[in-house]
Image (cartoon, rainbow, N blue to C red):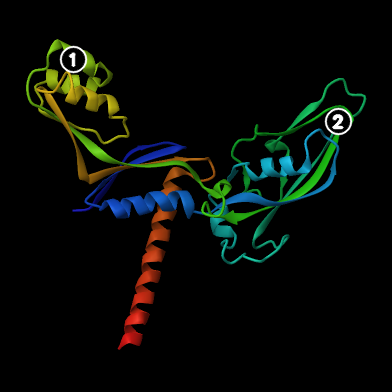
């Protein structure tokens, strides 16, 4: 029986337990979360004035790496495929972003220009981290530019990837064979859940969250060799997705699943067409 259980969820990270799903299927979700779920990012920048100490190209690069919240934008704007070859300022594909800042030459101090200083044409698209620095204006310096953001996918450039981390792991299963020695208990201090199970007379513990089992494997193969065993369940998988802030983690997983379904349907259509020609 196939089952999906959300084991942890917050604004930036999500962990799900997949039961009964194959490794290729789960890994496809992981890869699509990184490479195929669209987000908004700056793709064009036009400079009208910039006498700061930072070159236009560097500022343009920094603009491209600003994370924009895109939860609503991915449904409002046309897909990257539909916008291929379309230049700005097409409103169906692009969001306009304005920046015009100046520090008076008589000012005693300069000023940092941050993502929060950007004026964006669509209120649905806004910086996920308003304090992201763009450049510094010293007294007498000025910057004036217009940029355009569009939807893109991580496979085109990492700036469009909604996930900073997407990890797939087997579920670790610890089985208790015998009463652990003091040396074994000392080794397991980093894994108090196991000691708790042992002290309560339990005989197994299955981790359904993302943990590093390197130290646990050392204990199982070393000081705890006759007391516990560690093995990995290949029919139960842990998928962890960490968002960059562009999309909520649950949205990333949902959109990855939609992309996988669309690809499977497309493959089915192609195979049926080939089969029809063969007949």
Which residue is located at x 26 percent, y 41 percent? 170
Q: Is residue 173 visible?
A: yes
Q: Is residue 70 visible?
A: no
Task: Tell me the residue that label 1 is attached to.
Answer: 185
Q: Is residue 230 left or right of residue 260?
A: left
Q: Earlier in the sequence, mark 2 or mark 1?
A: 2
Judge whether 122 appears above or below 192 on screen: below
Which residue is located at x 68 percent, y 43 percent? 61
Q: Position of residue 45 (x, y in %)?
A: 74, 50
Identify the residue at the far right of this view.
Answer: 106
State the residue in front, 212 or 77. 212
Q: Is residue 60 left or right of residue 271?
A: right
Identify the residue at the far front of this view.
Answer: 222
Q: Position of residue 123 (x, y in %)?
A: 65, 48
Identify the residue at the far left of this view.
Answer: 178
Q: Residues within 10 Å of mark 2 (few under 14, many from 20)?
A: some
- Residue 250's tag is none
- SS at circle 2: loop
Identify the residue at the far top of this view.
Answer: 182
Q: Is residue 166 left or right of residue 16?
A: right
Q: Position of residue 17 (x, y in %)?
A: 28, 43
Q: Is residue 127 left or right of residue 38?
A: right
- Residue 103's tag is 2
**Which quarter of the rendered picture does the C terminus lie within?**
bottom left
The CA span between labels 2 and 1 is: 63 Å
State the residue in front, 32 or 274. 274
- SS at circle 1: helix
Q: How many marks?
A: 2
Judge whether 103 appears above or below 88 on screen: above
State the residue in front, 86 or 102. 86
Q: Position of residue 246 (x, y in %)?
A: 54, 44
């Amino acid at each position: 029986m196939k089952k999906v259980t959300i084991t942890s969820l917050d604004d930036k990270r999500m962990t799900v337990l997949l039961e009964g799903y194959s490794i290729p299927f789960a890994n496809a979700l992981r890869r699509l979360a990184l490479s195929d779920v669209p987000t908004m990012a700056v793709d064009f920048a036009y400079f009208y004035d910039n006498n700061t100490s930072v070159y236009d190209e560097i500022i343009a690069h920094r603009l491209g790496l600003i994370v924009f919240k895109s939860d609503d934008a991915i449904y409002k704007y046309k897909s990257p495929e539909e916008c291929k070859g379309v230049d700005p300022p097409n409103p169906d594909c692009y969001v306009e972003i304005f920046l015009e800042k100046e520090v008076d030459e008589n000012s005693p101090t300069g000023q940092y220009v941050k993502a929060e200083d950007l004026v964006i044409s669509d209120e649905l698209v806004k910086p996920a981290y308003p304090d992201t620095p763009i450049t510094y204006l010293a007294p007498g310096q000025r910057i004036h530019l217009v940029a355009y953001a569009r939807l893109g996918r991580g496979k085109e450039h990492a700036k469009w990837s909604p996930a900073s981390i997407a990890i797939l792991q087997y579920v670790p299963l610890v089985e208790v064979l015998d009463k652990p020695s003091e040396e074994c208990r000392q080794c397991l201090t980093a894994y108090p859940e196991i000691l708790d199970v042992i002290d309560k007379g339990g005989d197994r513990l299955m981790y359904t969250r993302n943990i590093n089992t390197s130290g646990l494997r050392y204990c199982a193969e070393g000081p705890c060799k006759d007391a516990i065993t560690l093995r990995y369940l290949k029919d139960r998988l842990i998928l962890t997705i960490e968002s960059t802030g562009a999309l909520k983690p649950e949205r990333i997983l949902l959109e990855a699943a939609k992309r996988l379904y669309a690809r499977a349907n497309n493959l089915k259509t192609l195979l049926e067409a080939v089969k029809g020609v063969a007949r």
